[in-house]
Amino acid sequence: MIVIDHLDHLVLTVASIERTCEFYDRVLGMTVETFESGRVALRFGRQKINLHKVGQELEPRARFPVAGSADLCFLASTPLEDVEAHLARMGIAIEVGPVLRTGAMGTILSIYIRDPDGNLIEIANASRASGAAG
């Protein structure tokens, strides 16, 4: 039996690495990391997102890499009300939320935005009381 502990990284295929880095740094506070080989990643907590530009993916790669096909959920330690205020200051529209969802560890309170490629980005807080919105 294999026991998976946690996610180390994932790969996001994007139209523009520069535009993606600017968004995830400015809007979500992730750190841009460039490797000696010129590869770029977004670091947050103990995880990272490696970036591949469409048409320049590294091998091995997803069978059908395409920008804008991801649906990601990030748990934030920042209260969701503060996240909403920050997004408003950044001019980022909230598409849905706040809404209750079921996360990996239980109920979460989520809002949804889009990144520059149209990927769906869910930003969530662990719910203070299961079933209580807000």
Image (cartoon, helix red, strand yellow):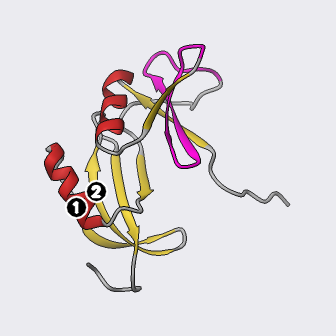
- Answer with the quarter of the image where residue 74 lies: bottom left
- Residue 37, compared with residue 111, is above or below; it is above
Residue annotated with mark 2: 112
- Which quadrant is home to the N terminus? bottom right
Residue annotated with mark 1: 96
Q: Is residue 113 visible?
A: yes
* Left or right of residue 109: residue 53: right
- Which residues, given as a range, are shown in magenta? 36-59
Within 10 angstroms of label 1, few (less than 14), some, or many (20 or more) residues? few
The amino acid beneath tag 1 is: Val
Estimate the x, y position of residue 62 in percent, counting from the top left. Answer: 57, 32
In the rendered structure, does residue 44 fall within the stretch colored magenta? yes
Q: Are marks 1 and 2 in contact (CB under 8 Å)?
A: yes
129 or 115: which is nearer to us? 129
Mark 2 or mark 1, which is nearer the start of the sequence? Answer: 1
Q: Is residue 16 visible?
A: no
* Left or right of residue 129: residue 48: right
In the rendered structure, does residue 52 fall within the stretch colored magenta? yes
Circle 1 sits in a helix, a strand or a loop, which is it?
strand
Estimate the x, y position of residue 122 in percent, counting from the top left. Answer: 35, 56
Residue that appears at 59% across and 20% down: 58
